Amino acid sequence: MDKKCTNCGNTGLKASTPKLYHYKMSGLENVYLKGGVTEYICPKCGARSTAIKNVIGLHKAIAQTLAITKRRLAGNELRFLREQLGFSAEELAKMTEYNQEYVRKIESGSEVPKAPFELFLRLAVLRGLKAPEYDLRDFAIRREYEIEELQFENKNRDWKASAA
């Protein structure tokens, strides 16, 4: 099935594969892709479009790379991590006990966050903490804690948590 121009409906699009593609759609200016990209040009109206393979996997790879980068992250990189985790600026503000305006200033680059804010985002990405069974947003509303018994069992020299 031929690709159709979204502008004029023409089906004779010309496809090309760039050697290096500047991926600005991530909101980051420093992301370039090798392979996995097809650019289409309509010879009739000149409209351009781009297809990128496995965008979800790409964004996960970008987030993982940012999380282990050995430098402070820029505001737009922190925004990317927050969005990749699926949190709104308001939710992140509640979890980190900042206000939403301060989070926006961090993400715009007009404020530099304290290290724990950045560390939280990095660790959340590395641990995959956006899973439905472990929702960090619950911590934002809790002020009390309850200590519960933890039991561990040793099997073949490996310790594993066991039912209490």
Image (cartoon, rainbow, N blue to C red):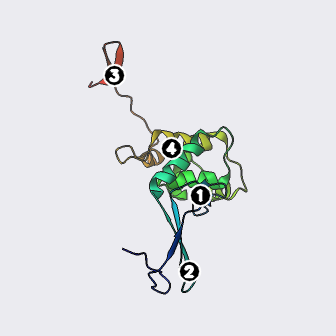
Q: Identity of the amino acid at label 2?
A: Ala
**Residue tagged 1:** 100
Question: In screen coordinates, is 152 left or right of 79?
Answer: left
Q: Which mark is residue 27?
A: none
**Mark closest to the chain's N terminus, 2 or 4:** 2
Q: Is residue 114 above or below residue 56?
A: above
Query: What type is the residue that disc 4 sits on?
Result: Val
- Sequence-wise first label, 2 or 1: 2
Residue 85: x and y in percent read 48, 51
Q: How far apart are labels 2 and 3 at the CA level?
A: 58 Å
- Residue 160 is labelled as 3
Quarter of the image with the C terminus in it: top left
Task: Tell us which disc is closer to us: 4 or 1.
Answer: 4
Q: Residue 125 shows which numbered tag? A: 4
Q: Secondary structure at mark 3?
A: strand
Q: Residue furthest right?
A: 110
The three-letter amino acid code for the residue at tag 3 is Lys
Q: Nearer the viewer, mark 2 or mark 4?
A: 2
Q: Report the quarter where the N terminus lies.
A: bottom left
Question: Is residue 74 visible from the viewing direction of this image?
Answer: yes
Residue type beneath disc 1: Gln
